[in-house]
Amino acid sequence: MSDHIELSVMKALCKRANTQYSRTLLSHLVKGDQKQLVLIDKPSVISSSREFAVNYMLYSLLRKWTGLETGIDTRSAALSSWLAAESKCRETNGRLTRLLFCSEPQGNEKTFRRISAIKRKIEEVLGNQPNFVKTFESCRWSNGATFDMRRGSTIAQKISSDRTVTREALPLAIAVLEADPHWIEAITGYFPVGPTSLIRPCKIVKGSRFLTVPKDAKTDRCIAAEPTMNTFMQQAVGREIRRRLKRFGVDLDDQSLNQNLAFEALVEDLATLDLSMASDTISKAVIWNLLPPAWANLLEQLRSAWTRVDGKWVYLEKFSSMGNSFTFELESLVFWAVAKASCDEVGLPQGKVGVYGDDLIVPQAADDVLREMLDLLGFTVNAEKSFGSGSVFFESCGKHYHNLEDVTPVYQKTLIRRSGPELVRFHNRLWRWAARDRVGRVKLVVDSLNMIRKYAETIITKGELPYQPPMEGDFGFIIDKYDDRPYKRSYGRRYRVYQYTVPLQIVDDDLQNLSYYSYRLRVSHRLTVPSFLNGHPKGYYSKEGKGFYRLSNKYIEDPVL
């Protein structure tokens, strides 16, 4: 085990699998040719479900692992894809503008009819006018990075600092700020009495900041770090769209609908589709031509029209991207409308439709029409991850099925740096994968599970290794035999487990206290209740910041198997 534990486990799995596919992977591992591990083709679905499940797990296990030494500049690869998406949006903007507003040859009746059908679906969800008062009651902070703040910055920092905002969003930001007297007190130190206007409420910036985060071994993921106040208000619009979509059966808080439809796809004749660079190819012309004008104008005010890439400002052809806090809801809305319109066109208005971001599911009869509509709007279907008529394999929202068998693979994205908790999660992912088909998979993983626990012994030197029975959570290494653990009536059996602890931080600074207090009044469920004295919090205990794992004893009831 001189190399990474992940590679050692991969070698053990390939030796146990002993298929033609696993032998090919093993030869690359032995040679140290790690680049080939991410370039090798996906295993063929023309095989038994059991063989495919094994090969597919081996294919997926390290494909997204950031520890592979491939020699690929992942940031450059991501930037190239981002520039290609901008070029795609530029072409879509020009094409749709010429098509819809300029004189074009006759014969576009079908196109106009499809655009109108999609617009009607979106208008059913949103209505003609947004309710500004109700919408902006839902403004929230996230822990993501903003234009001027790193990921993980505290709520107090975002509330009390010199907040950034685009010039277009400034009027809305002022309206939100001046409607919250407690926030004004957190900024100025004075509680306003009567009408109040802030002289300099925010710092104006030109747009967002381009950055990348790890995605897989071949490329990074592009993110737009939006100005702080833009993000705060984008959250409100995203939550409002999410709430309205639920009325039409699209629950973006629950992936189970898409996962269940992926299971039913084979017998219900459904098609599962995934899009390439979906959020980066939402062009401005698509939004302005599909959304009601009042909604499009609101989103336009809150988006960033420019982004700073390596110190240079770039004017965006896309409407929004990852990092914008309403992008996920907006793309879900557009794709749902396109999917429903395609079903209507083929005479299946009640056809089963599942939408979660860019994961789409429609009846196979509507598959071709859906692809045509997506192409019209400038979106590209990912052929590698899309399946329809004649396929026995379907996937959506992280669940994968082959001939109705669950073949969802195991992923190991992060590098295990002598981390006990990460070893536990790696071990349990393999255990749960094997548990889905105990007849054939247990023998495949037994060497690997023993190897992980043996490696853990070199890290965890104080006391026994953490263990847990077969159940949800990753408190410790899952074991089958749990009836020999010490038992305490009404408490359960005692285990040595990992527990995640977040240290409580005493906040003495009055400005931070006022910031937490103002946000506590806006979002009652997000923060712990402080002690109040004379109307203000004193000695507030914050739950922000990173925690740590520690070994401790835990009593767990025997699971019902």
Image: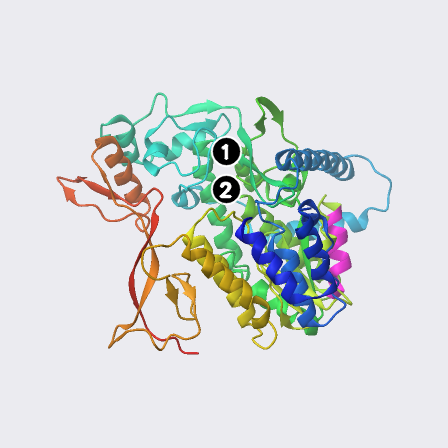
Q: Are marks 2 and 1 in contact (CB under 8 Å)?
A: yes
Vertical relation: 153 (above or below) 413: above
Secondary element under disc 1, as helix, strand or loop, is loop
Mark 1: which amino acid? Answer: Glu
Label 2 Cα neighbours within 10 Å, binned few <14 / some 14-19 / many ≥20: many
Left or right? Give the position of 73 relative to 449.
Answer: right
Q: Marks 2 and 1, how far apart in space?
A: 9 Å
Residue under pointer 2: 325
User: Magenta-highlighted stretch: main secondary structure?
Assistant: helix
Q: Which mark is residue 539?
A: none
Asked if the stretch drawn in magenta spans residue 222, the answer is no
Residue 342, image x and y in percent?
Answer: 71, 58
Between 172 and 131, the residue placed more toward the observer is 172
Between 85 and 131, the residue placed more toward the observer is 85
Secondary element under disc 2, as helix, strand or loop, is loop
Left or right? Give the position of 175 relative to 295.
Answer: left
Residue 478, image x and y in percent?
Answer: 43, 67
Left or right? Give the position of 390 relative to 238.
Answer: right
Residue 77, image x and y in percent?
Answer: 67, 36
Q: Quadrant of the C terminus?
A: bottom left
For the question of whether residue 88 can be seen, the reply is: yes
The stretch in magenta equals 364-375
Left or right? Give the position of 36 relative to 478.
Answer: right
Q: Quadrant of residue 68?
A: top right
Residue under pointer 1: 226
